[in-house]
Amino acid sequence: MGRAKGQPEFVIAAVLDIRGFSSFAMKVDSLQAAAYLRRVYTRIIDEYLQGSEFYKLTGDGLIVVFPCAEKVEYLASTALRSFIKLVSDFPKLCKGDPLINFDVPKMLGVGLSRGAATKLVAGGVTLDYSGRPLNAAAKLMDLARPSGLVLDDAYGADLIPKRMKPLFESTKVYLRGISEEGLTRVYYTRGLTKIPASAMRAPEVRWRHVEDVMTISDWKDHSKEAYYIGLPTAARSKDEVVVSAEYTTPHDIARHEVSRITVDDIDYVASPRSCVVFRPGPYVNKAVRNGAKGSSTMKFSVDYLVG
């Protein structure tokens, strides 16, 4: 593969989470938990995600991306229908599977958003996606409790098929790291989803998130020097800045998972321009020792409290 390049693209982003999986995993054997995840996500991908270009497992969650530069109305309404059906079918998704002869989670939460994202491509292969739609979908998924579907105004209320509009209610919320400066209108499944009152109050503490994504090979070019990630606003203090790294090994790719490590040795510079400074070398080397290939992506993320 050649070096990865970022390509802008209009996408529909969905983030799925199996509710109650952590408590379920504590009650069953690890082999049973792994078998359940493999079976349930195989069915979801094969039967409900036609038209998706990219998906990635995140533990018991799933990130899904649908390109939508053309036929936006058709793709958006089709994706919405698929996810509504998936949420409805989820309690019985493994019914009749002889391998899954134990009780499994019955609820699924889904967040949906739409907009411009960056696709990371190398050698014609899509390695990853990043951008606002994916971040927003993750925040919306967290609101889809105890189960159901939540989409934001960016997805487009007018793209909800007319016969499906009665399935949704609407309210305005603050999305941490997305819309803390103002309210965002969201649409959520009636009878399934309960938006907490706390989501409708302005957060007392505001978080920000920034990230840089490159291939392992590209990060190696910076491994012997300090690396700067600029922050759009000042952090409250160095102690409230968290830097982490994500990468994938062949083992991760086979399981559609991601490896994560915390970057401990960082400096925060407040002026003249706020930034975080660290040396990526040790973390890149650790990723390589763990089996990450030069063509695979590595993402350094900064989460911090606004000053």
Image: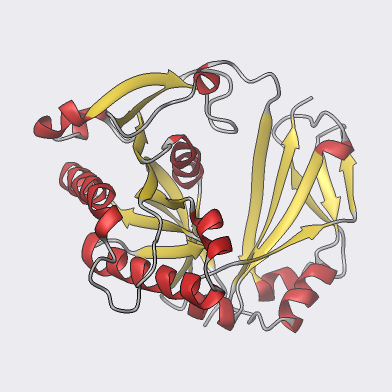
Residue at the (59%, 16%) spot, across then down: 202
**Is 196 placed above or below 142 here?**
above
Residue at the (65%, 50%) spot, across then down: 211
- On screen, residue 263 versus residue 112, left or right, reads right
- On screen, residue 215 versus residue 38, left or right, reads right
Residue 139 placed where, x, y %? 50, 38
Residue 185 appears in the picture as rendered:
yes
Residue 223 appears in the picture as rendered:
no
- On screen, residue 242 versus residue 118, left or right, reads right
**Is 299 placed above or below 137 here?**
below
> Based on the displayed image, in which of its 4 quarters is residue 278 positioned?
bottom right
Name the residue furthest left: 163
Quarter of the image with the C terminus in it: top right
Number of marks drawn: 0
How is the rendered protein coloured? secondary structure
Residue 117 placed where, x, y %? 45, 49
117 or 94: nearer the viewer: 94
Residue 303 placed where, x, y %? 71, 42
> Based on the displayed image, in which of its 4 quarters is residue 50 positioned?
bottom left
**Is 78 placed above or below 256 here?**
above
150 or 92: nearer the viewer: 92
Residue 214 placed where, x, y %? 63, 64
Residue at the (79%, 76%) spot, across then down: 285
- On screen, residue 227 versus residue 118, left or right, reads right
Residue at the (30%, 63%) spot, across then down: 44
**Is 95 placed above or below 184 here?**
below
